[in-house]
Amino acid sequence: MIDHSRPLGLVAGAGRFPVVVAERARQLGQPLVCIGLADMADPVLEDVASDFTWCGVAKLGRMIRLLRRGGVSAFMMAGKVHKTRIIGTPWRLWRLAPDWRMLRLWYARKRDNRDDSILLDLIAEAERDGLRCASALELCPELLVRPGTLTRREPTRSEWRDIEFGWDLAREMGRLDIGQSVVVKECAVLAVEAIEGTDAAIARAGDLCPRGGFTVVKVAKPQQDMRFDVPTIGPATVESIRRAGGRVLAVEAEQTILLDTEKTIALADRHGISIVAR
């Protein structure tokens, strides 16, 4: 879907993924019109993207105008949008100050507010202005993790049982569009990811199981749309597991983004954490 003869759009949320995408676009000589979500996107994007503008997360009309003004026909979405800052913000209409287009879309919606529902409605709204949403993985497919044990340490037999136990549970949570991760120990569920995100779910598991030694299972949704919300891991994920006392991270091969591969694996090896891609 990407027309490399025209500038490419990027709506950037939090985390390292949007920076990696922008760096890849620069390596390829691909002009990039980047919109950084205020208070979420990494400021380093200002120096990486050829065209960068900050924008509030509720300024849908402004985002569309910026993309069209930049000559964009296809745009990508990358990075985390902190939904707690939207759902849980007191006086949110005042603080988020949505523009008219976002207000019209939001209150005309007939679906629930799960991630897929919201993002698909936003994509459909952009398509009304001739803006197609593409997957960032079209630009950097090498980020998808390959099958196998990535670290020196293999999971133990009991940890493999926890991986098997957690796998179907995580898939079911994904099918319901609740979250992508579950944390298990001795075939018991310690935490299920929801609106708080993977790192916070891992931290909660550490609080509930101070002795540690648990397994984190993170998988794609059965209906995963590769244009958004693709499971992503990196050094920050490993560091969250280390702090909480976890021992294993199991992810879905070919469906999970692995950022900063060498750094991630080296950090896991240093702390005796197994990373497995099934």
Image (tube, grey):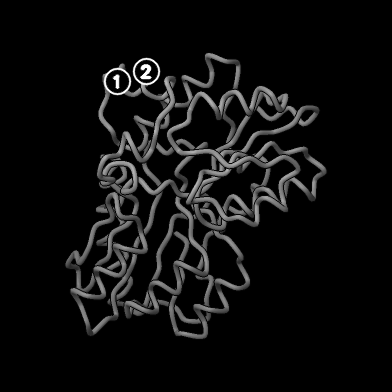
| Residue sitting at x 39%, y 53% | 219
The residue pinned by badge 2 equals: 104
Position above or below: 225 against 161: above
- Image quarter where the C terminus lies is bottom left
| Image x and y of residue 27, in percent | 79, 50
How far apart are the two marked residues, 2 and 1, measured between alpha carbons?
A: 6 Å
Circle 1 crowding by C-alpha within 10 Å: few under 14, some 14–19, many from 20: few
Secondary structure of residue under mark 2: helix
Relative height, residue 160 to residue 118 (above, below): below
**In the rendered image, which residue does mark 1 sit on?**
107
- Front-most of residues 95 and 57: 95
Q: Residue at x 57, y 79 (%)?
A: 266
Image x and y of residue 135, in percent? 58, 37
Side of 91 relative to 96 (left or right): left
Residue 262 numbered tag:
none
Is the Cβ of the residue at disc 2 closer than 8 Å to that at disc 1? yes
Q: Residue at x 28, y 55 (%)?
A: 193
Q: Position of residue 72 (x, y in %)?
A: 69, 26
Left or right of 21, for residue 207:
left
Query: Total marks drawn?
Result: 2
Q: Residues within 10 Å of mark 2 (few under 14, many from 20)?
A: few
Q: Choose top left, top right, bottom left or bottom right for residue 32.
A: top right
Q: Estimate the x, y position of residue 182 in percent, counting from the top left.
A: 28, 59
Q: Amino acid at mark 2?
A: Arg
Q: Residue furthest front?
A: 94
Q: In the picture provided, is 96 more to the left or to the right than 208?
A: right
Q: Work out whether residue 267 or residue 88 is closer to the camera in this orientation and state it.
A: 88
The N terminus: image quadrant:
top right
